[in-house]
Image (cartoon, coloured by chain):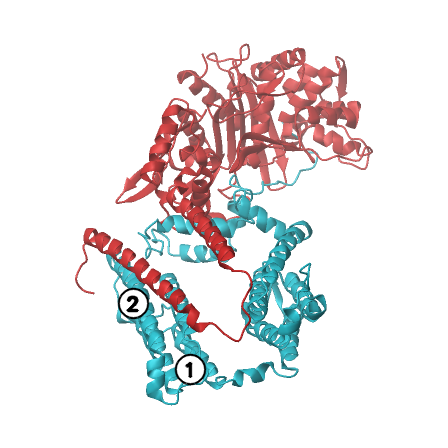
Amino acid sequence: MSRANGPLDIAGTWDLRAPERALLAWSVVTIALGFFMLWGSTHVGGEAIGRLDLLPLVLYALSLLTLHLMLVTARFGGDQLILVAVAFLSGFGMLAQYRMGSFETTGTISLNLILFPIGLILTGATAIVLMRGRYQAVTQGHWIWVWAMLSLGLLAMLLMFGQRFRGGVYAAGLSTPSEILKVTIVLFVAGFVARNAKSLSFWGHGLPLPPWRALLPLAGFWLVLASLLVVQRDLGLFIILSIALLTMLFVGTGRSGYLLLGGIGAFVMVAVVSSVLPHGARRVAAWLDPFLDPTGGSWQILQGLSGMFSGGALGRRIRARQPRIHANRSIGLHLFGHRRGIGVRGVRDRDPLLPDPVRPEPAGGLPGT
Amino acid sequence: MTTHLNPETWSLIRVALHVGFFFAAAYLLRSIFNALHATELRHLPRAKWSVRVPIILLTLLFTGILVYQATWQLIGASRPQFIAFMQLHDRRELNPAHRIQRGRILDHRGEVLAYSEEILGEVYRLYPDGPAFTHVVGYSHPWFGASGMESVATVRLNGGAPDGLGDWGTLGRQIVTQDKRPRGQDLRLTLDAELQRMAFGLLEGRQGAIVILRPVDGAIRTLVSAPSYDPNRITPALFQDSAPGAALLNRATQGLYPPGSTFKILLAASALEQGFSGTLECPADGFTTSPRYRKIRDHEYYTARKSGSVWRGQGRLDLATAFARSSNVFFAQLGVRFGHDVFYAMTDRMQFNRRIILHETPYGAWSMRTGEIPRLDPSDRYGLAQMSIGQGAALVTPAHMALIAGAVANRGLAVRPRLIETDEPAPLAYFMSSSVAERLSAMLRQVVLGGTGRGIETPRLAIAGKTGTAENPHGSAHSWFVGFAPADRPQLAVAVLVEHGGYGSATAAPMARDLLLRAIDLGLIE
C-alpha cells in the first residue's frame, strides 16, 4: 500500500487509499455496535437517551472521515494501517469514556469530546507537514541529541519542581508532562538506530555478542533515563519505552538478539527492582496475592476486579453506575471524599471496631467509695 | 428514544450486538494483519530468525491473563475473601456482592438480631432492635462498609466458610450456576437478647456501659454501650463525631475510666497473696506520703465536714472491714506499704496494658482493651497511693472489670471472653490463686451484706460485689458496680459503669441487682 513515488493527483490518492477507507468504515461499524449496546442498556435501565448522547459516535465518524479526506487531498502516500489502528483503539477509548460519563455536561458539549477531533486533526496535520521525506529533518545532525536532552531535562525539571502525590511525581494540576517522552524518546531512538544501523547490526562472528561500542551511547542514555524514572516512580513508562527501544533495534537491524537481550534485561530488572525497591516488591506481592494487603497495596487491583465483577460476564449492568441516593443527599459528598481517599475511610475501614477510646483525665486523690 | 424497549427483547438484542461487535472487531483485526505485508519497509534488513514463535508465545500469555481475569467475573463468588472485600470496600451499590443473602446474626436462644431482606429487588440488612445490639453486632452497609461482628465474621455470614458437606455442595452449585447471590451461614452469638435489651433500657439517656458474662466459660450475655446508634440508619454525621460522647465509641471495651474503689478488689487480692493479715491505723485526717501532697481521706470525713460535725476516723482496720467500708486511707497505705513492684506484678498478672482478642479473622479482630497502668517512677509513692484507691493514673475498661469479677468468681481463673457461641472456651490466665479468690469472694459478699453495697441486698439472690465512685475532672463522679452472683456458686459476673452517675451504691449497684434478678427469670441463673 505504500509507494516509493507518491501519486500525482487526488484521484489517484483516492484510489490508493481505498483499503484505509474500507478499514476505517469497519472500525466505525464496530464502535457503533458498542455504542448501541451502551444506549440500549441505558434505555432499559430507565435513563433517557438525549441528542448529546449520540454526539460521541457522530464526532468519531466525522473525525475519521475528515482525517482521511485531509490525507487524500494532501496526496499523502504513506502508511494506511496506522490511522486504522489509531481509529480502532481510540474508538474503544471513546466507548470507555462515554461509559464512565467523561462526556457528560449539563446541556453543552463536553470539552473532553472536542479533544478527540482536535487530536486527530493535529495528527493528520503533523503527518502532512512531515511527509515526502521531510520527517528526516527531525533526526538529522545533532537533532537526535536535542530530543534526548529534552527528554532527560523534562524529567529532571519534573523531579525538581513537581509535587509528590501517592508515590508518583506530578506537575501542576497533577498533570504528567512525562507523557511527551513517548514522542521525544522514540524520535531519539529511531534517529540513533537509523544512523548507526550498520554498526548496531554487527553482532560479531562466532559467539553472537552485541556491539557494545556502538550501543554505549544508547546504553548510557537509557541508564540515566531509568534512574530518573525510578525516582519518579514511573516504572510503567520505563517498561513502555524499553519495549519501544527493543522493537526499534530489532526492526532497524534485523537482529533477533536484541529481543533476547531485552528478555534477559527484563528478568534482571525484575530481580533488581523487587530486591532493591520496596515499592516494586510490594507491587509484585500485591499482584501475586491481592488479599495480603487488601486496603493498602492491593486496593486498586481489587477495586478493578470488583468493578469487573459488578459488570458481569456480559456487562448486564454496564450503565447502572450511579448509586441510588436513599435518605441523605449529603452522602454524595461523603462518597466523593472516599473516592479521593479522604474522609472517614481511614478511621472506619481499617478498624471496624472503632475509634480511639475516651480517655478521661485522671483525678486527684479524692474520696472514692 | 421514546418507545419503551422490553427488557426481555433487549437481552436478546444485547447478545446479538455482542456477537456482532466481536465478529466485526475480529474481521477488522484480521484485515489489518492481512494488510501488514504491504506496509513493510523494504529498505530495512530482514531478521534471520522468524519472530512468529515469540509472538505466538506472547499471544498465549496474554490469553492466559485474559482467561484468569475472566475467572474473577465468572467464579468470583467462590472466593470468600473477594466477596468480603467487595462488601466492605466497594461502594458501587450495583455490585452483586451487596445483594448476597447474608446469614442471620442470632442470640444464644436463636432470636434474630440481624437479617437480610429483599425489598423491590434490593437486599437490605435489617436490625430489628436498632441500637441495642449495635456495639456487638455492628452494621453492614453498601456504602459505609461494615463494623462489629458484621465485619469480623463477614466471610462466614457470606457463606464463605463452609463447615459441612451440605455447605460445600451449595457452594459448588453456586459456582456451576454462576449464582452471584449465595446464601450465607447464620452466626449465633452468646448474647441474651432479653437481658441486653433491659441493660440498654437502664442506660437510656445516660452514657455508660454494662457487661455481663459467665465466669465459667467466658460467654458474654450482655455487652451494652450507651449512647448507641441505629444500624438501620447510618449517616455520614455518625463518623464525623469524635467528641467524648460519640455514639460510635464502644465504651464497654474501649472506654478507659478511673476505676475508683472497684480497684480495691485488685489491691485486696494482692494483699491476700502477700499473706497480709494485720491491721492498719486509719485516722480521720487521712494519709499522705509527703506534707507537700494533699491527704487522701475517707468519704465519711467529707460527709461529716459537710454537715458541720466531727468524725473520729476508722481507727485500726483489718482488710475485710476496710474492704467492706471501702476505706481509702487503708488501701492507700496498703499500696504504699507493698510498694511498686508488688503493685505492678499484680496488674501484669491481671493482664493490664493489653488488648484481648475475642474473635479474629483476616477481616479484623473483635477485641477489648483491658486497662492502662503507667509505670511510675519508683520514688513516686503518692502516685502509687492514688492508684491503689483506683484514682490517679489508673484506668480500666468496664469489660476488664467484668473479667476480673469473673476471675474471682471462677476460683481465680479468668476465661477468655467470647461472643460467638461456637468458639471454644479458653483459659486466659490465673488472676489470683484459688484460695485468695475464695477469701475475696467472701469479702465481696460482705460488702453487699453490710458494707457500701448493702442497699442492693435482696433475699432472692446472694450478690457479691464492690461499689465504686470514681472522681474525674469532667464533672460528677463515675458510678461503678462490679460483682457476681450467686455468691456461693457464681453463674454471672457483672460490671456496670454510669458516667457521672454519682455514688456507685446509688446508681450502678441497683442496675446490677435488677439485671441479675432478671437473669434468674430468664433462666441464666439457676
Q: Circle 1 sits on which residue?
A: A77
First-in-chain label (2 vs 1): 2
Q: Residue furthest left?
A: B3
Q: Report which colour depicts chain B.
A: red
Q: CA distance from mark 2 to mark 1?
A: 25 Å
Q: Name the residue located 41 percent from the left edge and 23 percent from the top edge.
A: B108
Q: Position of residue A86 (x, y in %)?
A: 42, 70
Residue B11 visible in rendering: yes
Mark 1: amino acid: Gly
Q: Seen from this angle, which residue lies furthest front?
A: A206
Chain with cyan colouring? A
Q: Is residue A266 left or right of residue B520?
A: right
- Residue B237 appears anywhere in the view: no
Determine whether the residue tagged by mark 1 lies in a helix, strand or loop.
Answer: loop
**Which residue type does callout 2 highlight?**
Val
**Residue nearest the observer in this picture, B321 or A303:** A303
Q: Residue at x 49, y 21 (%)?
A: B513
Indicate whether A4 appears above or below B201.
below
Q: Residues within 10 Å of mark 1 (few under 14, many from 20)?
A: many
Disc count in the image?
2
- Residue at the disc numbered 2: A29
Quarter assignment of residue A10: bottom left
Check the residue under mark 1 and report the chain it is in. Answer: A
Observer-nearest residue: A358 or A205? A205
Identify the element where label 2 is drawn: helix
Left or right, B321 with respect to B511, comes to right
